[in-house]
Image (spheres, coloured by chain):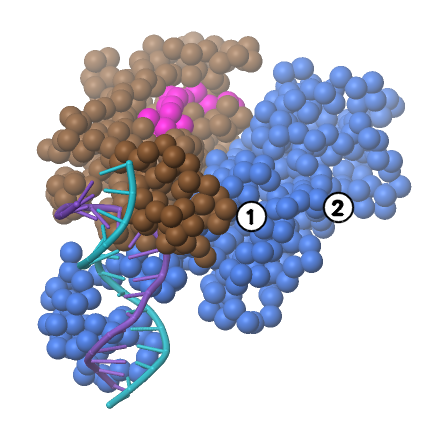
Chain colours: A blue, B brown, C cyan, D purple
DNA sequence: CTGTTAGCGCTTTCAT
DNA sequence: ATGAAAGCGCTAACAG
């Protein structure tokens, strides 16, 4: 293992000079730079990140906090983050919260002690009552760069990137309402925290706008997973006043709901219209192909990383945000509401997606 | 930031004693332990991993090298790794190779300099000609614990975990042959490296066993993605002697192939039987549900991490391996071969999967 | 069982 | 523009 001293000696300069050359911050004469670089090459020198981290408390590591890497939305976002960060020579430490605020707190602590230079939290699982927000906000007050995606922290001046999920949810409800549905359920997630918040809000707002009533039994909190979707739909189907359409908090839940319907012998979309959220790659391949609200997952991650990079360079700069659009992708899990009097109109299956 | 000195002072002991207490290796009197722990609690002390890493060259970090976190197989495996490792207080640094041996080399270097305590490579992209193997093997000779999953390194005594993919591929071909198919193509991946190797071998062996001929045009190397599958199938369909069935290197490719068929107006499985590999969560939800060879992705990751943990504790121990079974899951993308004389037998759609 | 003493490899004032 | 020297916070012999 060759150290900065070896290089310094071979180049005939002081170790501090070598350090300066490698961190290209101070002004060094061109010839010194050349000598140092040559010596470094000769000796195959590579600075030790631990030592430099210890001395400078900059580690070129950032922590990415997501709910679950197995969720395709999260993994796509993660890839966006990594691709951006690696160009700046940062590595990404990915940790999972499973949507549990306590676990989020734990992993946050863990990567904090590891000395990461910043965090991306996608999304923060903020329950308003919580010490969790406090913890994150404390970190920020200590000068730790944080950017959140999806939600942002109340009362904190934070960089964040988000999609117009609320608008997306409204578009989904509009679509369903135009098809004649009035009994529209909202399924999945915790409506008071995490990603569900904006979607839930959009759902309610659109329902109100259309003059549709919000039946409490049509609002189900579940696991954000295939499982959760199946359970929720099963419960919904056992209701005396079952809805004719649902908006799921994400595609996984929607897909699970489709499964549950199929298990009960229901046909989609004839017997139940379903809209998902995210447009994960498999939404298009589902049976039938899923109508959903597409979110730019990769780009959300990439942009979040860019904001973080800026923040880490200029901690004093004003907070920025990037807000990306969602779009409704109409496929084949939604169709016109079937009354007792009219026959269902056949689903279009022209191959191409229609986008709103 | 409270340091080990603060704790030592408050507990009335030497810093090294505090260190010993926290690393629970040496023998310390019970009362000293108690005093130290109390002091640590009082001061809210948390050891600094960078400092300890620098001094001891143990960082409690491990590098996980995968092809792409967006691939559901990889992300499931990654989660298995993380879940195992985090119990031992390690963090996982995930890097992507995109199946490119050069990139693999680059990321390997990067995490090596970061001082990880070990690697999991899933799978190594070994081209036999390559300096890549040398690099990995050199790392091992330097004492760096490595475990590979899927493939293993030639000529190296390495821990690895793998599934019986070759047997799985054979089972898939058996299944197809029993259905009367003889023109069976193999689609996707590089047959000389990465995950494809074993599957390709199994395919060939089974074809031979059934006395079926290996037509060179039926062996397509493609991207391991939806895209790649679409392209490959499109090419296959333009062949004068088009196959009646394909075994895809993984589910993504199979799903892409289904898409291509659909775009050309072909019906699955009537016009083309398709078998995938991996059994990602969406295989079951595809249209039609995909017949595939299931691999225990999460468990592969979990077990790999366990082996690595053992190796990091006892570097001298003999190499171990864990070999897990694959199983054929018959769903609805395969059906009996339709000759000119006989009508196709209808696909079963009894809801439940049949497993071999 | 515990204390003393050197570092681990780099960065960062403070000089010059 | 460059050098000297004092750490960053912890661990690991070596004593005792």
Percent x, y of residue A243: 79, 27
Magenta residue span: B288-303
- The quadrant where residue B170 appears: top left
For the residues marked 1 and 2, what is the alpha-carbon distance in whole angstroms?
Answer: 20 Å
Q: Is residue B324 magenta?
A: no
Percent x, y of residue A103: 54, 38
User: Which comes sooner in the sequence, label 1 or label 2?
Assistant: 1
| Disc 1 secondary structure class | strand
- The quadrant where residue A154 appears: bottom right
Q: Which mark is residue A122?
A: 1
Q: Which mark is residue A202?
A: 2
Q: Is residue B294 magenta?
A: yes
Q: Nearer the viewer, residue B118 or D15?
A: D15
Q: Nearer the viewer, residue A63 or B28?
A: B28
Q: Is residue A261 visible?
A: yes
- Chain bearing mark 2: A
């Amino acid at each position: 293992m060759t150290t900065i001293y070896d290089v310094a000696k071979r180049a005939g300069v002081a170790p501090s000079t070598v350090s300066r050359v490698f961190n290209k911050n101070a002004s060094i004469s061109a010839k010194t730079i050349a000598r140092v670089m040559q010596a470094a090459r000769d000796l195959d020198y590579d600075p030790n990140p631990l030592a430099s981290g210890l001395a400078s408390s900059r580690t070129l590591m950032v922590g990415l906090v997501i709910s679950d890497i197995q969720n395709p939305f999260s993994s796509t976002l993660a890839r966006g983050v990594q691709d951006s960060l690696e160009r700046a020579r940062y590595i990404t430490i990915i940790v999972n919260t499973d949507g549990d605020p306590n676990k989020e707190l734990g992993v946050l602590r863990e990567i904090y002690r590891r000395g990461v230079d910043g965090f991306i939290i996608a999304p923060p699982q903020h329950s308003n009552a919580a010490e969790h927000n406090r913890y994150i906000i404390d970190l920020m007050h200590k000068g730790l760069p944080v950017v959140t995606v999806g939600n942002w922290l109340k009362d904190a001046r934070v960089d964040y990137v988000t999609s117009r999920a609320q608008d997306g949810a409204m578009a989904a409800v509009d679509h369903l309402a135009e098809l004649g549905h009035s009994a529209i359920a909202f399924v999945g997630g915790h409506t008071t925290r995490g990603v569900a918040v904006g979607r839930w809000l959009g759902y309610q707002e659109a329902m109100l706008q259309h003059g549709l009533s919000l039946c409490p039994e049509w609002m189900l909190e579940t696991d954000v997973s295939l499982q959760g979707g199946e359970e929720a739909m099963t419960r919904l189907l056992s209701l005396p006043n079952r809805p004719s359409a649902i908006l799921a908090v994400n595609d996984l839940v929607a897909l699970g709901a489709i499964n549950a319907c199929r298990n009960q012998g229901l046909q989609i979309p004839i017997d139940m219209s379903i809209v998902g959220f995210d447009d994960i790659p498999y939404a298009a391949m589902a049976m039938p192909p899923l109508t959903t609200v597409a979110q730019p997952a990769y780009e959300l991650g990439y942009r979040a990383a860019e904001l973080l990079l800026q923040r880490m360079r200029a901690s004093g700069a004003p907070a920025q945000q990037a807000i990306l659009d969602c779009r409704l992708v109409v496929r084949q899990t939604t169709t016109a509401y079937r009354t007792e009097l009219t026959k269902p109109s056949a689903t279009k299956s022209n191959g191409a997606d229609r986008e709103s």
